[in-house]
Image (cartoon, grey):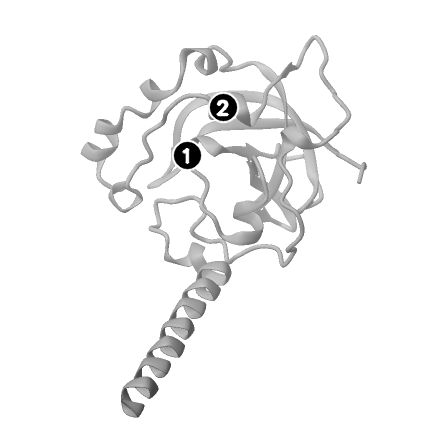
Amino acid sequence: MKMLKTKNRRSAWLNFAMVSAVVVGLSLGVFQFLPKSHPMRALRGGSDRTGQVLEPDSAQGVSLVTEAHQSLTFKMLTSYPFREPNWAKMEDPAYIASLKLDEQISPQIQAMNGRKVEIQGFMLPLHMSDGNLRTFMLLKDQMACCFGNMPRLNEWVYVRVPEKKKIDIHQDVLITLLGTLHVGAKFEGVVLTGIYHLDLDRIQIDQKE
C-alpha cells in the first residue's frame, strides 16, 4: 500500500510537470511550430506584460472619424461565421481553392473594399526593413501578443506601411489606424497574409489610461 501511494504521488507530480512544460512552451514559442504558410510563423512569443487584456470596444479612444474615413470595428469584421483553414494544407492549390475564402466574407464587409476606414486594435510587428517597420498585424485584443493565443483568420488586419513613411513600434498600447481597406484573401508566395489588408495613412496612439 505504501509503494502504491508513493507511485501515485510521483504520477501526480509528473503530470503537473508535464502540464507546466506545455503551458510554458506555448506561451514562449508557440509561433515557431506553425506551418510556413501562416503569417505569424516567424514570431517568438511577444510581450511579457501580464496585466488586464484590453479590447478596443472597451477603450475610450479619441475618434478620428471624418467624412472621408468610415468607422470599422473588429466586432464588424468577425460578425459572420468563417471556416478556419487547415494551415498545414495551405501550400496545396486545390485545397486553397476549395476553401472559397472570398466567398465566405459577408457582403457587408465586402462592400467596404477600397474604402477609407478608421479602426482600433493592438499592433503585432511583422517585418522590418532598414530599421523601419514595413508590415504589422492589427489585432482585436492582446491575447495573441501576450499569451500566445492564435487569432482566427478574420480576427486580424494585415497592415502595410508606405515605403517613405516611418512609424514607431507600439506594443501593448491601443492604437487607431486610418487607411484604405482591402477585402479579400492575398498571398505573398505560399503565405496567406490575411483576408483584410490596410494601406496605412496615419496612426494615432490612445494616451488615456
Q: Compared to 121, does 34 lie above or below? A: below
Instruction: Provide residue 46's location: percent of width, then percent of height.
Output: 57, 55
Q: Residue furthest left?
A: 94
Instruction: Provide residue 173's location: percent of width, then percent of height.
Output: 70, 42
Tell me which residue sits at (18%, 33%) in the image: 94
User: Looking at the image, how many numbered discs can be counted on the residues?
Assistant: 2
In which quarter of the view is residue 193 placed? top left
State left or right for residue 56 relative to residue 95.
right
Q: Compared to 42, does 76 lie above or below? A: above
Q: Compared to 191, does 107 lie above or below? A: above
For this rendering, which residue is in front, 189 or 50?
50
In which quarter of the view is residue 209 placed? top right
**SS of the residue at dot 2?**
helix
Quarter of the rendering occupied by the N terminus: bottom left
Tell me which residue sits at (59%, 44%) in the image: 142
| Residue 207 seen in this snapshot | yes
**SS of the residue at dot 1?**
helix
For this rendering, which residue is in front, 82 or 92?
82
Q: Residue furthest top?
A: 67
Q: Which mark is residue 77?
A: 2
**Residue on which the image places disc 1:** 153
